[in-house]
Image: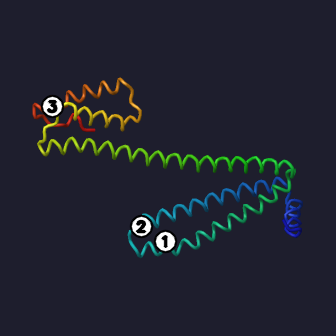
């Protein structure tokens, strides 16, 4: 902070007093909240507006709203700097460093979470694609009226379950064998395959 600026802030505290400047800070913060709300509302109005003429009017209005928003930021910064002069400097610096470290951790966590989510979505998409291709293979074989023996059906179904579950246990394999037998009976009777679709 420049010496001249600091001198002006200190004079404001000396002349108006600490209680008055605290109340002033409440007022300025409230005005800033209102200015932020206007910016958001104006952006939403532009996005919703379908009429090109009205949309252009709102865009022209945006410049004035942003200018008012910047004014309120400056007003808050002025009173905030005065509050910083009132409180002990070492306490302020300590709290600032704590919160900056917390922010840094949150940023790293967010980046990590986003990368994990992205990988998980790609893996899920790949598994689903493989599972669908096996299911479609069975359906296409039926459409072509090819006879599927029990072993080929069992292999297809077990492979699909392995892909869907990732790491199937023996119980899953037994269930898949029962499922394939039921499917074979379904095919013999010429019934639709609805119960075997996901």
Dot 2 alpha-carbon crowd within 10 angstroms: few under 14, some 14 to 19, many 20 or more: few
Residue at x 58%, y 47% (from the top left corner): 112
Quadrant in which the C terminus appears:
top left
Q: Quadrant of residue 49?
A: bottom left
Mark earlier in primary sequence (1, 2): 2
Q: Are marks 1 and 2 in contact (CB under 8 Å)?
A: yes
Dot 1 alpha-carbon crowd within 10 angstroms: few under 14, some 14 to 19, many 20 or more: some
Q: How far apart are labels 2 and 3 at the CA level?
A: 56 Å
Residue at x 69%, y 57% (from the top left corner): 29
Mark earlier in primary sequence (3, 1): 1
Residue ID for mark 1: 58
Dot 3 alpha-carbon crowd within 10 angstroms: few under 14, some 14 to 19, many 20 or more: some
Q: Position of residue 152 (x, y in %)?
A: 22, 35
Q: How far apart are labels 3 and 1 at the CA level?
A: 64 Å
- Camera-near label (2 vs 3) is 3
Q: Are marks 3 and 1 in contact (CB under 8 Å)?
A: no
Q: Is residue 69 above or below residue 155?
A: below
Q: Secondary structure at mark 2?
A: loop
Q: Quadrant of residue 72?
A: bottom right
Q: Position of residue 102 (x, y in %)?
A: 70, 46
Residue ID for mark 2: 49
Q: Is residue 70 left or right of residue 21?
A: left
Q: Secondary structure at mark 3?
A: helix
Mark earlier in primary sequence (2, 3): 2
Residue at x 63%, y 69% (from the top left corner): 68
Q: Is residue 172 left or right of residue 54?
A: left
Q: Position of residue 91 (x, y in %)?
A: 84, 47
Residue at x 86%, y 67% (from the top left corner): 8
Residue ID for mark 3: 186
Q: Which of these two is toward me, 196 or 169?
A: 169
Total count of labels: 3
Q: How far apart are labels 1 and 2 at the CA level?
A: 9 Å
């Amino acid at each position: 902070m420049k010496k001249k600026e600091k001198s002006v802030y200190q004079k404001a505290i000396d002349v108006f007093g600490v209680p008055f400047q605290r109340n002033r800070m409440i007022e300025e913060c409230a005005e800033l909240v209102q200015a932020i709300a206007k910016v958001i509302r104006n952006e939403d109005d532009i996005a919703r507006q379908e009429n090109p003429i009205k949309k252009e009017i709102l865009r022209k209005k945006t410049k004035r709203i942003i200018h008012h928003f910047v004014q309120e930021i400056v007003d808050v910064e002025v009173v905030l700097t005065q509050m910083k002069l009132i409180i002990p400097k070492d306490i302020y610096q300590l709290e600032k460093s704590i919160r900056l470290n917390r922010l840094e951790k949150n940023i790293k966590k967010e980046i990590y979470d986003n990368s994990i989510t992205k990988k998980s979505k790609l893996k899920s998409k790949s598994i689903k694609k493989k599972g669908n291709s096996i299911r479609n293979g069975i359906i296409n074989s039926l459409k072509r009226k090819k006879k599927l023996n029990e072993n080929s059906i069992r292999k297809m179904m077990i492979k699909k379950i392995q892909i869907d579950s990732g790491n199937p246990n023996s119980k899953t394999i037994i269930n898949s064998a029962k499922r394939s037998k039921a499917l074979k009976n379904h095919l013999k009777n010429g019934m639709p395959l609805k119960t075997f679709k996901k």
